[in-house]
Amino acid sequence: MSHDDLCFASATELAKLIRLKKISVVQAIRAHLDQIERLNPTLNAIVTLTADSAMEEAVIADQKIAANESLGILHGLPVAHKDLFLTRGVRTTFGSLAYQDFVPDVDSLPVERLKKAGAISLGKTNTPEFGAGSQTFNAVFGSTPNPYDLTKTCGGSSGGGAVALASGMIALADGTDLGGSLRNPASFCNLVGIRPSVGRVPSWPESLGWQTMSVSGPMARSVQDLALAMAAMSGPDDRSPISLEAPGEIFLNPLARSFKGCKVAFSANLGGLPVEPEVARVVESSRAVFQEIGCDLTNDEPNIAEADEIFMLWRAWRTELRITPLLKEHRDQIKDTVIWNAEQGLPITGPQLARAEAKRTELYHRMREFFQKYDFLVLPVSQVVPFSIEEEYPAQVNGVKMNTYIDWQKTCYLISALGNPAISVPAGFTDNGLPVGIQIVGRHRDDFGILQLAHAFEQKTLFAQRKPPICKPL
């Protein structure tokens, strides 16, 4: 197989080739390391490279195959971990100068699971400082551009993983999603990214073990690969008090199914949010695809008026808890938007949070009733196309002023407040060749259902097969 074949083979196919001894793990890892050497100086996606240990692990992985040992479902696949995840013995900076030399002695649970499934880590991927914002830049490593246009952002906060994946440096990527950090970069980089149900991919270590707003999950170049990664990352763990009992193996079931008569609520703007014209055009064009696969579309959206307040309160409170202890010694090393968000959390009272949680419970039941009428909700992933890498965030969307650094992400973060699983799948391109994704939201805990609908959509469109211009074959 050629270098290009290895780097852009699906994770599912690459794992199969390795198991059948058609290629060696050493070959696969070497090809991806070569791709990193070729493209990473321009893309800045992998910020800490662990090439030597990766090659050592590849040799051991091949020895296991030769000895007919039991293999994990990701055996030999090259991955890299978001720089918010702890990686034992490997620098973890959180994109902050305050942690630029920090080396943890444990792995985060998602990292541990990928390793257990046989994946081989090539290093760490770039993220905005503490994952704050959907524009991947920080004072430690700088910016990560969009591989489809180097003058644009790749999104975030799992932006480094998205770019490494889109450019063939790794076969699968991991990340976190509080307000859209797996869905937004997937949309901006022509990938699939899922925000799983809370507890589907357990989190540990976690100071807020009962928190239900931020989740972990994977990104991939196809829905089939995403399901494979979900199979490896999902399942119960008693270190997380909210982990779901369903085993990860449920995601190995066939994705193909009939959607004839499936009832889909289609929302162009989630109740009047500003959306850029190019996003609106691509989203509108997706209607025909859903109809072609048998879906019965109705223009509708749930009443989620309180979701904004709920999300912003919990985000501020969570940020305050994490960041305020650092400000005494490191205030000058932390970006202004993170400090602002932390200080927004200082005056929040217990009664405010209690009322927010009560409203969130009301929202849950409203969504439950909404999904008695519909099987899925379809809407834009992002309200904007990838913007200039020089902008920290869009100051306005379609003429409407944005008041904070995350306002332009409401089509993502309002869904986060609901707790429903959601997936971003490639839906087309702007006239200038920038990717645009469509977001599919499912019923409570119906992660597999959204994977199935995304798979059916993907099979009709094949947008994901379009590679970034920078990835011309050698």
Image (cartoon, rainbow, N blue to C red):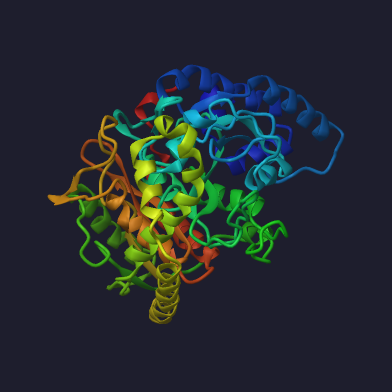
Residue at left offset 36%, top offset 56% = 412
Q: Position of residue 43 (x, y in %)?
A: 41, 25
Q: Nearer the viewer, residue 389 or 310?
A: 310
In the drawing, does residue 283 fall left or right of residue 461?
left
Callout count? 0
In the drawing, does residue 251 fall left or right of residue 22?
left
Q: Position of residue 87 (x, y in %)?
A: 64, 35
Q: Position of residue 428 (x, y in %)?
A: 31, 47
Q: Nearer the viewer, residue 402 or 303?
A: 402
Q: Split into 4 quadrants, where in the image is the N terminus?
A: top right
Residue at left offset 43%, top offset 47% = 181
The answer to whether any part of residue 162 appears in the image is no
Residue at left offset 63%, top offset 47% = 110
Residue at left offset 43%, top offset 30% = 333
Q: Quadrant of residue 405?
A: top left
Q: Position of residue 226 (x, y in %)?
A: 54, 49
Rendered position, 399 above or below 313:
above
Q: Quadrant of residue 71?
A: top right
Q: Nearer the viewer, residue 90 or 411?
A: 90
